[in-house]
Amino acid sequence: MVARALAVSLEALNEELDALAIRRKAYRVARGSDALMPLAAATAGPSGPPVRRRQRGASAAPQPKPPDAPPATEAAMLRSLLAEVGPRRTLLAERLGTSGGALLARFRAAGLERELSLRERDLIRALWSKHRGSERKVAGELRTTPASLREISIERGLVRELEAERDRLRREALRRRWPRERIEQVLHRRDELRELGILEGLDREVAVRAGVIWNSLRGKRDADELFAKKLQLTRGDALRLQKLLHLS
């Protein structure tokens, strides 16, 4: 561009610059550099942060209304109901207006089938232990029938476990010592022994053994007291046993 401005050829310009020993300096000036650029100077002005001025009569913008809370989901509602009434199918059916397979399907659709199953199993186990294997009492607390309880036990895979607990209770009852422990359970735990299926056998045993003792005391003036003493019973339990066995 310099050669063109001087109306000379580039070769002639280079020769002239070489002759003057300023070729490099001339090229450097022509290209320019940071050192040759003028420095920027700050201008005087007010200091401090910028100030935003509000127009007169302008009111503050209204705050946006918070969004409404989302409605409770089906799962949250079912979980809350489950916590309130427990895994009792009859009560759940009454509150939800459905029963049977439809009730289970509703929990399944909400992703709560496993939670219902686990809680139902735990509740049945606890009630079975509390009522010492009494199917009737457990069904009563679940607000259902013994037949329905058996169906639920099959569905939840509890049959073998519950029956094993009953077997343990039977063995425990049959190991009671004669005479006091064995007779006391016949007098005071008849419903439990009946449900365990061993009441009839224990009744026969007590009737035979206690009857032999009573017959040996028959006719004696203090027969009642001697009967209670030989059987290690309180006077009240001895009288209950006599009434149960029709001893007179």
Image (spheres, helix red, strand yellow):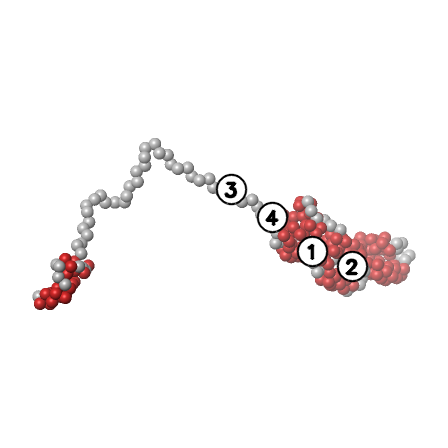
Q: Residue furthest right?
A: 219
Q: Nearer the viewer, residue 152 or 134?
A: 152
Q: Nearer the viewer, residue 145 or 224?
A: 145
- Judge by depth and name the residue closer to the eye, 2 or 81: 2
192 on left or right of 35: right
Label 4 to label 1: alpha-carbon separation: 26 Å
- Look at mark 2 in the image and give the residue it sits on: 196
Q: CA distance from mark 3 to mark 4?
A: 18 Å
Residue 124's label in the rendered image is 1
Q: Residue at x 47, y 41 (%)?
A: 66
Q: Residue at x 87, y 55 (%)?
A: 245
Residue at the spot of label 4: 74
Q: Residue at x 80, y 53 (%)?
A: 236
Q: Which residue is labeled 3 in the image?
A: 68
Circles 2 and 3: CB distance less than 8 Å?
A: no
Q: Are marks 4 and 1 in contact (CB under 8 Å)?
A: no
Decide which of tag 1 and tag 2 comes sooner along the chain: 1
Q: Of the residues shown, which amino acid type is indicated by label 1?
A: Ile
Rendered position, 76 above or below 232: above
Q: Quadrant of residue 202?
A: bottom right
> Mark 4 and mark 2 in contact (Cβ < 8 Å)?
no
The C terminus: image quadrant: bottom right
User: Is 152 displayed left or right of 68 in the figure?
Assistant: right
